[in-house]
């Protein structure tokens, strides 16, 4: 008898199984199909896609092992499942940037943003939610932040696309730079001449404690705050 606990329902979805598997052979078949689809060697010529595939492949393998283990002891797992409320799909997340320039919320993407999203080659389960153009109008969408329903993407000036899953996010901190280091007189004069300096830095870490990205100079502070709140919400939803 298949296990219907919350964890197994999540693992089943990871393997592409719509409902709980009815047999171990169904688990094996789904695992082979998912592992073949997301084997990192298939993306040898695409570095950012290979990194995503490596993460997917690890999740697929972990889901397979857990489903097999739970299937061996259905009586215990079935009793647990009696107290589990069926998982309801989360509503599609939204984001609001106000009138911040270069920021767009789905589905109101201009054509050049749609082209940038298409060029990122998102998988079929990823839905774009928000887009922040960091190019400053010099080379539109050459640098950007893309927020999806499962992952955060950041494309830097070198064209490298870095990706982190919300479920793999660790600490997210909005750091007050002025509180950390009070500016001296000459520094304040320099900032006045150059324009208003950014007060906050957004620190984004992975679950293992490693640093994913620090956003300091761009986007501006009000956009950092929007992204900060969005990431906290998505992290909470994905890890609950």
Image (cartoon, rainbow, N blue to C red):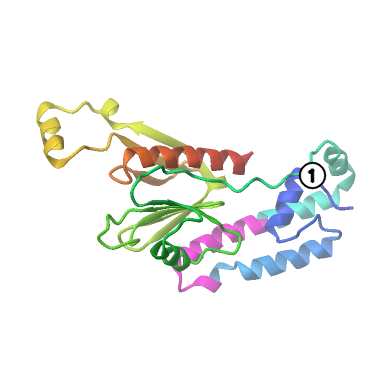
The prevailing secondary structure element of the residues shown in magenta is helix
Residue 168 in sight: yes
For the C terminus, give its image quadrant.
top right
Q: Residues within 10 Å of mark 1 (few under 14, many from 20)?
A: many
Residue 207 in sight: no
Residue lying at 55% horizontally and 67% vertically, measured from the top left: 40
Taking the image as shown, residue 65 lies to the left or right of residue 187, namely right
Along the line of sight, the residue nearer the viewer: 114 or 69 = 114
Q: Quadrant of residue 184?
A: top left
Taking the image as shown, residue 88 lies to the left or right of residue 141, namely right
Q: Quadrant of residue 60?
A: bottom right
> Residue 62 location, x and y as percent?
67, 54
Along the line of sight, the residue nearer the viewer: 42 or 141 = 141
Q: Which residues are magenta?
A: 42-61
Circle 1 residue: 5
35, above or below 217, in the image: below
> Residue 131 location, x and y as percent?
43, 53
> Which SS class for mark 1?
loop
Residue lying at 46% horizontally and 43% vertically, measured from the top left: 96
Q: Quadrant of residue 162?
A: bottom left
């Amino acid at each position: 008898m298949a296990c219907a606990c919350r964890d197994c329902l999540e693992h089943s979805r990871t393997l592409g199984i719509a409902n709980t598997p009815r047999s171990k052979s169904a688990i094996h078949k789904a695992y082979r199909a998912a592992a073949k689809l997301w084997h990192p060697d298939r993306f040898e010529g695409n570095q950012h896609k290979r990194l995503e595939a490596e993460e997917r492949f690890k999740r697929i393998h972990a889901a397979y092992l857990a489903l097999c283990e739970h299937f061996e002891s259905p009586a215990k797992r079935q009793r647990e499942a009696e107290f589990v409320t069926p998982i309801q799909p989360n509503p599609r997340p939204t984001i609001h940037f106000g009138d911040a320039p270069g920021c767009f919320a789905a589905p109101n993407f201009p054509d050049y943003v749609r082209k940038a999203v298409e060029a990122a080659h998102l998988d079929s389960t990823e839905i774009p939610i928000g887009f922040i153009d960091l190019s400053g109008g010099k080379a539109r969408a050459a640098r950007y932040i893309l927020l999806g329903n499962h992952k955060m993407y950041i494309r830097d000036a070198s064209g490298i696309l870095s990706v982190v899953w919300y479920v793999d996010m660790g600490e997210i901190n909005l750091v007050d730079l002025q509180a950390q280091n009070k500016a001296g007189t000459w520094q304040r004069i320099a900032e006045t001449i150059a324009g208003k300096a950014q007060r906050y830095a957004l620190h984004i870490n992975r679950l293992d404690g490693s640093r994913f990205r620090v956003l300091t100079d761009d986007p501006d502070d009000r956009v950092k705050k929007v992204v900060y709140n969005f990431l906290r919400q998505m992290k909470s939803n994905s890890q609950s």
